[in-house]
Amino acid sequence: MTTISSHPQASPPAPPAGPPAGTIRAALGYPAFRFLLAGLAVSQIGDWLYNLALVTLVYQRTGSLMWAGVATGARVVPMVVLGPVGGVIADRFDRRRVMVVSDLLRLLLMLGLALVAVTGLPIVFAPVIAALATAAGTPYLACVSGSTPRLVRDGDLPGANAARSAVTSLGMMAGPAIGGALLLLGSPALAFVVNAATFGAAVACVVVIRDRDAFAVAIPAGEPMALGGAIGSVLRGIADGAAALRAHPAAIRLVGADLMCSVVYGMQTVVLVLVARQAGLGLHGYGYLLAALGVGAMVGTSLAGRVLRLPSRLGLALPMGLVGLSMLAMPIAHWGSVAILLACVNGAGAILVEVMTETGLQRMLPTEVFGRAYGLAIPASIAGIVVGSVVAPVLVSALGLNGSLAACGAVALGYALQLLARPRYAPVPAAHAGSALAGS
């Protein structure tokens, strides 16, 4: 891959007059963004159906829950460990080419998994290939997020990020359902082949976007033009990303809020099983509550444009308050309908924090270092889910279900209240932030 130097960017073309600025409908008025979103949507659905097939394949071959857990971990750990490296790559090379290469590598790896499924190859290859596929995808989201502000006007950026969050939520709901149907039709190999096809479709969606400038990157003078295996270059890039975040206290607050919501979600993957039982929802109640989180997230995306018009601290404190209050109220949810409603509220608050974090980072971070900073924020969010799922059993054992729910909600609500308690902070303009970064 070759690097492309930055040059002044023209504003994205205005969409047809109609929907209010900042809404998902307004963002969908940009043809280039629609293609980017379509590629992300098919890829997300493929990822979630492939996860189901991967765990099924490993468990069928081994009969071991430990091996199934290893396969799941193989999909997560590389993103946490290598996510910062992916951010460096997203800032060093043409992002269109990075996305295409990432998808093509994952396409080939999915075909490799299909080969493992239909042959007698050792099952250890399955988690290894899954880990390689995750590693190959580490630059992808940083490329998508860094390119989005060049495909839509700034006023429609909240709607664009809300649309991206919406397709992720849809993928989480539709992917496992499609994966389950494919498993009924045949072996897990069929699901792996379908996932490979989704990566091919994502490549096609990116390639047809004509605006090459949207994917260009800036290489500051004096910085290496290629990684070339130089570990020092990668470490410097990661340090630059950390410096960019430190230069913006508002960015740290946003990443902290997103991390907090990730920890809450990680806890929910464990404790909602007990909440469903307590609320009388029965054996399938856990699935209902997870689905309610998704429904709430979809509702939240429609409110993102309005919330982002509020003062920054208030706009972030409100959804964080929803996350905290809904968890605090869970102990008194002795009726299934109440528990489902609270899960919807929680999902709406969490997705609003996600959209605000995405939009805030895009607006305040210098474009030339965005990928490196984003490459630190995303792995932190994923690590938060892991931490929450690990801490949840410990808290339930120590405090009981209601105590653990109350403790989780109190921490999230406390974060929201401290946002309101401190004076507002004026974000550093991107140009000044770049100067601060250069001197750090």
Image (cartoon, helix red, strand yellow):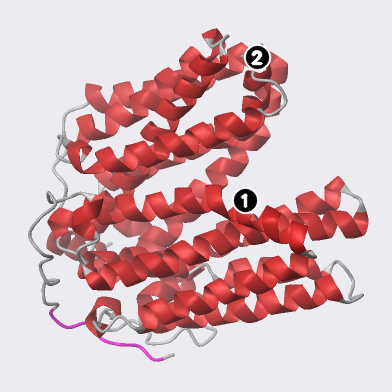
Query: Is residue 415 visible from the viewing direction of this image?
Result: no
**Residue 5: in magenta span:** yes
**Residue 220: in magenta span:** no
Q: Where is residue 365? Give x, y as percent.
A: 25, 59
Helix, strand or loop for disc 1: helix
Q: In this view, does 76 lie to the left or right of 438?
A: right
For residue 338, above or below residue 158: above
Helix, strand or loop for disc 2: loop
Q: Where is residue 25? Give x, y as percent.
A: 22, 54
Please give the range of residues in magenta: 2-8
For residue 198, above or below residue 242: below
Q: Is residue 287 left or right of residue 259?
A: right
The amino acid beneath tag 1 is Ala
- Which quarter of the figure has residue 134? bottom right
Please tell me which residue is depicted at 58% across the width and 76% down the height of the picture: 197
Q: Nearer the viewer, residue 259 or 242?
A: 259
Please tell me which residue is depicted at 22% across the width and 26% down the height of the picture: 422
Q: Disc number at residue 159?
A: none
Identify residue for label 2. Answer: 280
Q: Is residue 27 left or right of residue 409?
A: left
Neighbor class of circle 2 (other Cα within 10 Å; few <14, some 14-19, many 20+) is: some
Q: Is residue 208 left or right of residue 101?
A: left
For residue 281, above or below residue 376: above
The amino acid beneath tag 2 is Gly
Please tell me which residue is depicted at 75% across the width and 74% down the height of the picture: 114
Q: How many marks?
A: 2
Q: Nearer the viewer, residue 28 or 234?
A: 28
Q: What is the CA distance from the residue labelled 2 to the residue labelled 1?
A: 25 Å
Q: Where is residue 27? Give x, y as percent.
A: 22, 58
Identify residue for label 1. Answer: 177
Q: Which of 64 and 85 is in front in this view?
A: 64
